[in-house]
Amino acid sequence: MSRRAGAGAGVVALAALPLAFLAVFFVLPVAGIVGRGFAPDGHLDVAGVLEVLGRPRVHRVLWFTVWSAALATVVTVLLGVPVAFVLYRLRFPGRGLLRAFVLMPFVMPTVVVGVAFRTLLASSGPLGGLELDGTPAAIIAAMVFFNLAVVVRTVGSLWAGLDRRREEAAAALGASPLQVLRTVTLPALLPGIVSAASVVFLFCATAFGVVLTLGGLRYATVETEIYLLTTQLLDLQGAAALSVLQLVVVSVLLYGAQRTRSTREHALERTGERDATRRPRRRDLPVVALTTLTLGFVAAPLLTLLLRSLRVGDTWGLGHYRDLAGTGGGAGQGTALLVPASTALASSWRVAVDATLLAMLLGVLVSLAVSRRPRARSGRRAVALLDSVFMLPLGVSAVTLGFGFLVTLDRPPLDLRSSAVLVPIAQAMVALPLVVRTLVPVLGSLEPRQRQAAASLGASPLRVALSVDLPVLWRPLLAATGFAFAVSLGEFGATSFLARPENPTLPVLIYQLVSRPGDQNFGMALAASVVLGLVTVAVMAAVERFRLGSVGTF
């Protein structure tokens, strides 16, 4: 077998299991939903689909989705890159805790984020004077708040491993700090920035909880419109048409982003984090000040959430936290929950462990496959297509995915309706693209000549992997594991369809509490959100402490 054929066979072997998993637990459910919408009576109804796409409201929803997601992405990148510099390039006490803090909004249930912003911006809230409640600005601010961690951790992980000697050499030759940034630093960071921006745009374009809470019916995205058509208007054909439109647009965007990354991605000279970082200097004051303001922006909704959770009637106390051991329901309101919140937290933990293991297994295989650099053009195209395919779950509604599980995996040989494996599988599907995006930039930046040199000295492929790849990869592997676990803990969209009423996860239970009347239920929801956030921060802080590096973190 020739070397080229062997490389192709290696990519196929690595991608076989993830592709099979994707076909069964992504393509099949989505195809089932689309089929029910396009052919409600068993016959293709193209005219009905075109009628849906021609509705003026659909045009408004699509336009709002595009411009709000684009603006939120630009703002997130502009704020996230300076924060990434401070948290990953400067060395100071408490840096690991701040990294975990930045991640906290991203792993919180989206409906809770929406409630926190509404509380913050309402006329009676701390920022009520700005009169932003119910405006697109509030939605965009929540999107930035939610996705800031994506840019900070993706760009920061790449930045932390860059060798500073190139920047120092450029400065020694007379380049100004701005010229060093423009000609040396930004070109090296561009693959990470493009990767993060593409993920942020997808998350913003498919935002669900925050848009539903803050925009209502007036400001809807394609995602919330699909939800409303499915659950409120029972217009499955309209929802299916929008799902297909969303899938096509997302596919085009992913392909474009992948092409941009592939043309900019190149091997980088890496160094240890200790050598890559330095203590803050006077000239860092502007970026440190901007970072402080950005962290304050992140802290404001979280602080509001914390304070509201401690407000019991007209007094302050821990009553809502003590209520988490029960099943809720105030006087005269009946029992709100089937299980205590503490039981739901334990269930979330078990499900997240299973989902993380599955996401990491598949994510590592996919990352190894799509980080290959075939010499033939056809090989490069195949790898690019494979990369985009495994990003598709990011662009498909989690609500659609969960609903698709129920309507397609309900008959032999895959009758999984009553199986407990559906929830961790759905959460793994959500976490898988994030694991891939964490590992691929690192694998793509590895210097192939190091592998070739080791192989020419007689090292076996396993020895090459252990001696060349693993010293760089184990750190982002650990970070990706912690991140997948945190994302699984907070996943809500698909889980809301699949979790059993008697065995809910904590995000599902929080939504149940928010949906029930009564101050006690709402207070318990806020307290449970704080607990979920603290658990997430503890997990990520442990990852930051024991990871001993930052290459490839998400």
Image: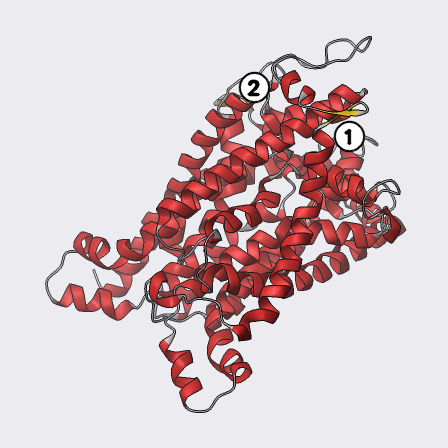
Q: Is residue 177 left or right of residue 515?
A: left
Give coordinates of residue 260: x percent, y percent.
Answer: 53, 69
Q: Nearer the viewer, residue 396 or 95?
A: 95
Which of discs 1 and 2 lies nearer the camera? The answer is 2
Give coordinates of residue 339: x percent, y percent.
Answer: 61, 13
- Residue at mark 2: 342
Which of the image's four quarters has the N terminus? Answer: bottom left
Secondary structure, mark 1, is: helix
When the figure is inspected, residue 176 is found, relative to residue 501, above or below; the finding is below
Q: Residues within 10 Å of mark 1 (few under 14, many from 20)?
A: few
- Tag 2 or tag 1, which sits nearer the N-term? 1
Give coordinates of residue 138: x percent, y percent.
Answer: 79, 50
Residue that sits furthest to the bottom in the current view: 174
Q: Nearer the viewer, residue 448 or 167?
A: 167
Q: Residue at x 80, y 36 (%)?
A: 229
Q: Nearer the viewer, residue 315 or 146?
A: 315
Residue 231 — which label? 1
State which quadrant residue 317 falls in: top right
Q: What amino acid type is highlighted by mark number 1?
A: Thr
Q: Residues within 10 Å of mark 2 (few under 14, many from 20)?
A: some
Q: What amino acid type is highlighted by mark number 2?
A: Ser
Q: Is residue 469 left or right of residue 439?
A: left
Residue 407 can be seen, yes or no: no
| Colour scheme of the picture | secondary structure
Residue that sits furthest to the left in the current view: 458
Residue 151 can be seen, yes or no: yes
3D distance between C-alphas at marks 1 and 2: 29 Å
Q: Nearer the viewer, residue 10 or 197?
A: 197
Give coordinates of residue 46: x percent, y percent.
Answer: 77, 45
When the figure is inspected, residue 288 is found, relative to residue 507, above or below; the finding is below
Q: Is residue 94 left or right of residue 471?
A: right
